Image (cartoon, helix red, strand yellow):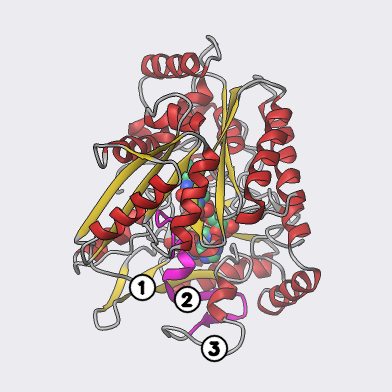
Amino acid sequence: MAGRRRKFWGWGFEDQQPPQAEVERTGLAAREQLGFGPAEVERPPRLEELDLPGPRVEAPAALAEICATDPYERALHTYGRAYRDVVRAFRGHFDNPPDVVARPRDEHELEGVLEWCAEAGLAAIPFGGGTSVVGGVEARVSQGAAVSVDMKAMSRVLEVDRESQAARIQAGATGPELERGLKEHGLTLRHYPQSFEFSTLGGWIATRAGGHFATLHTHIDDFVESVRAITPTGAWESRRLPGSGAGPSPDRMLIGSEGILGVITEAWVRVQGAPAHKESAAVLFDSFSDGAGAVRALAQTRLFPTNCRLLDPGEATLTASAPAGTALLVLGFEGSGEVGAAMAQALELCRAAGGRPRERRGDSEGAWREAFLSAPYLRDTLIAVGVLAETFESAITWERFDGFVDAVRGATENALGGEGRVTCRLTHVYPDGAAPYFTVLAPARRGEELDQWEQVKTAASEAIIAAGGSITHHHGVGRDHRRWYDRQRPDPFAAALRAAKAAVDPNGILNPGVLIDP
Ligand SMILES: Cc1cc2nc3c(=O)[nH]c(=O)nc-3n(C[C@H](O)[C@H](O)[C@H](O)COP(=O)(O)OP(=O)(O)OC[C@H]3O[C@@H](n4cnc5c(N)ncnc54)[C@H](O)[C@@H]3O)c2cc1C
């Protein structure tokens, strides 16, 4: 990454931003395909145009070398990468930038940063790749001044234990960095969230990220053997164990803690050799519901495909060139041994549920994956042409599945007021339920996008909670999901979490407002 700077307002590196003429061409073509008609094309902001409030604090001399206060660093660390983040940044609105960005190179420096924050009464906001979509890294804090604690300088694979097939990796490693480090040992983690390029191991653990495995190892949780974090009251490190029944798990408590209990510095994760065998196939269904029936049968037969993404007709037509009106199941198996028999059995189950396997295996998966990985880049272009583009996800058991998807889709469409479209896919599936993932595409009301999205998000989230789903399956809670997360979790659990935070972070400096009240 040396020498390349990330865009401070959107996805990818600065040198990946297409020329304005291309943005216009692609963006307007996308609008036409979506049926939204032409629109004015806006330009992204330039750094020199930003009017950031000045930093309110200065780092102590001992930390000066690892601290930055220049506009680029502060702008880059102001937001995550949700639609509302990119819209605000695109318009040059950076109201709450962190005052200082600290990049500790080791735990000693990190301890120094936390001590400074505690003494000076500053909020310390752990920052991995800054790809949060729930306001997790935003300095909307009652303290006023805030330090963004960027873990990027701690990004190495430190140790590999071949015998146990595990690796010790620093929290700031991005997906490509940790896979490069593991490849030198002939190993791989194989956890691929869509944000893989920029999100980090520490961020994945802190948010319980979901990867590309649609079954079995759906979340990073399943790969974590032990975790180490620095809290304001000392180091918290769990034992390396393949499993343990010793009380509530110290790993699990850090997994999903979203930076409120400590800054994760490293973890031992379970790794494996690259899969020797892979097979993929695409299956068409007359309806999403038929496809869901097949997916349920697959999960309950314990076949555990690696990929099992069911796209509703709207999404299949848009992203994978499936014939209009058909749902598409993208199916994949991988393993160290042959996977042909499992695929054959899976296709048989799909046929029995009304599915029509496509002849050319792998065909649709390629098209779908390309669209999947380019989506975050395309979103920047869509914003320039005034398209509201955002996603949200949940999870629900099978017996409530159909009603749930209908209710959430209906509430979301209603809030859009008949404009735009709402599509759904299943990203992760379980024997007892599935994770529906919704995409909203609509003509944006220019200048009012935040209110427009707020209405849609509120309606969708209310419907999710009312119908018994989870406010998130893998995007985390952050600041933006608090209202609904608070209703989802049991009250005694909330009290226990507050007490845990008070014990390890007595001054309440770590990511205030995330998961619990400051
Ligand atoms: C285009 C796009 C696609 C995405 N796709 C997926 C996906 O497929 N699956 C998925 O699960 N999520 C996805 N996300 C959401 C996001 O990528 C995940 O939440 C990811 O795990 C965040 O990692 P990060 O390193 O960027 O963390 P950040 O965004 O920097 O931080 C997220 C939260 O974790 C905390 N945190 C970060 N690092 C640490 C640390 N070392 N110690 C303690 N706390 C820390 C932060 O304070 C914050 O609360 C996507 C987001 C975008 C924008």
| Span of residues in magenta | 209-238
Name the outermost residue toward the front.
352
Q: Amino acid at mark 2?
A: Val
Tell me how far mark 1 sits from mark 2, CA to CA.
12 Å
Dot in front, 1 or 2: 1
Q: Amino acid at mark 3?
A: Gly
**Residue 195 shows up from this direction:** no
Q: Mark number for residue 227?
A: 2
Quadrant of the rendered image containing residue 414: top right
Q: Given contact means CB atoms under 8 Å apart, are the residues at marks 3 and 2 in contact?
A: no
Q: Earlier in the sequence, mark 1 or mark 2?
A: 2
- Residue 448, percent across and down? 70, 24
The residue that disc 3 covers is: 245
Q: Secondary structure at mark 3?
A: loop
Is residue 476 within the magenta segment? no
Q: Given contact means CB atoms under 8 Å apart, are the residues at marks 1 and 2 in contact?
A: no
Q: Residue at x 34, y 32 (%)?
A: 16
Q: Given contact means CB atoms under 8 Å apart, are the residues at marks 3 and 1 in contact?
A: no
The residue that disc 1 covers is: 270
Q: Mark number for residue 363?
A: none
- Residue 226, percent across and down? 45, 78
- Residue 206, percent across and down? 54, 63
**Residue 276 shows up from this direction:** yes
